[in-house]
Amino acid sequence: MELTNLGDLVVRKSYGGDITFRVERFVREQAIIKGTEFRLLADAPISDLVVINADTPGEKTKRARIKATESLQRLQKDRLDLTERNRSSLGRDFIPQGEPSFFEVPGKVLHLDGDERYLKKSLSLYEKLRVPAHGYYVTESAMAGALYRLLPNIQPDILVVTGHDGVLKNRPTADLYNLSSYKNSKHFVEAIAAARQYERNFDALTIVAGACQSHFEALLQAGANFASSPSRVLIHALDPVYIAAKAALTSIRDTIHITDVLTHTISGTQGVGGIETRGSYRIGLPKLKDLSALKVIPSM
């Protein structure tokens, strides 16, 4: 049997090798493993793990990667379409020689993540889409406290609070309405409440919250615009990012199309849901100048 080491990519035999994990650490005969695509932190007997090659992921992981690529391509296309619509709406007077003379102001994102590796992936995606984002690795229990400091400093249009969550195996009650049945949902609720103390207007601050199997109803009731997980399923690591990016790139004149944004996340409507929300993207005139090339006659 092949030895399992820290950092190895593995699947679980008992689950039919459906999801790819990375080995984070060992606790006696158990391995703590983290999903490479899904926001899932789990433990498994070392004997249940099979080391795999990065080119041969689990079946669910393979499908998730394909869906993630499609979602990214759709967002990039939406980004280009948005620029073209702006060119058309401004008319010829503001497009000399076919070049746009406006500038874009996408919504600004503040992203708190309880997982450092997923945070890096998320920030990379924001960068690809040219969405301004500030990311911080914060454990779920510390998020509410961090927001009291970060929100006034960064003043974002969109807030993402995510990390790890899940329905507990040995929960004190079988009641899924009870927050004590979840690993971190109560911490996400506290973070949302802190954010809503800062900004009560749902269109002035769009909140995307939750992780795998989070208490969807409690997160919405606390004040989230979008949350996971309606059917208590695993969500893809980048689902909160896709929703935040869609909010950042939807005009303030428009409402985010809920069916459009949710059906094109990787997890779909079983994994994420939300309420009608206005976008936070703006355009400005005239196009910003290159000050290094500007010839200015001093007036003083």
Image (cartoon, rainbow, N blue to C red):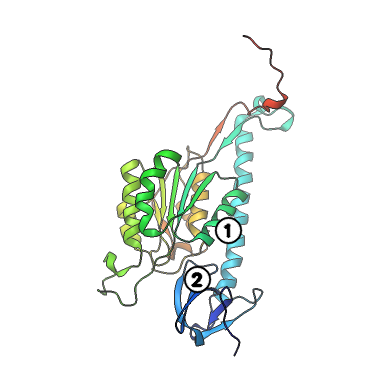
138 or 234: nearer the viewer: 138
Q: Residue at x 60, y 45 (%)?
A: 130
Dot 1: what SS?
Answer: helix
Give the left or right position of residue 277, taking residue 102 as reference.
left
Q: Please give the residue where the numbered disc 1 appears in the rendered image.
A: 71
Q: Hey, which residue is sitting farthest front in the picture?
A: 28
Residue 183 shows which numbered tag? Answer: none
Neighbourhood count class around disc 2 (C-alpha, 10 Å): few under 14, some 14–19, many 20 upward:
many
Q: How far is disc 1 from disc 2 in space, using C-alphas?
A: 23 Å
The reply to whether callout 1 and callout 2 are in contact (CB within 8 Å) is no
Give the left or right position of residue 190, taking residue 260 as reference.
left
Which of discs 1 and 2 lies nearer the camera? The answer is 2
Q: Residue at x 52, y 63 (%)?
A: 266
Give the left or right position of residue 232, taking residue 84 as reference.
left
Horizontal and vertical percent for residue 70?
61, 60
Q: Tell me the kind of residue under disc 1.
A: Ser
Circle nearer the N terminus (1, 2)? 2
Q: Hey, which residue is sitting farthest top in the picture?
A: 300
Dot 2: what SS?
Answer: strand
- Residue 266 lies, with reference to residue 276, above or below; the image says below
State the count of labels.
2
Q: Which quadrant holds the N terminus?
A: bottom right
- Residue 90 lies, with reference to residue 24, above or below; the image says above
258 or 199: nearer the viewer: 199
Q: Place residue 298 in its image quadrant.
A: top right
118 or 88: nearer the viewer: 118
Horizontal and vertical percent for residue 90?
61, 30
Q: Please give the residue where the numbered disc 2 appears in the rendered image.
A: 34
Horizontal and vertical percent for residue 75?
58, 52
Q: Which quadrant holds the C terminus?
A: top right
Q: Tell me the kind of residue under disc 2.
A: Lys
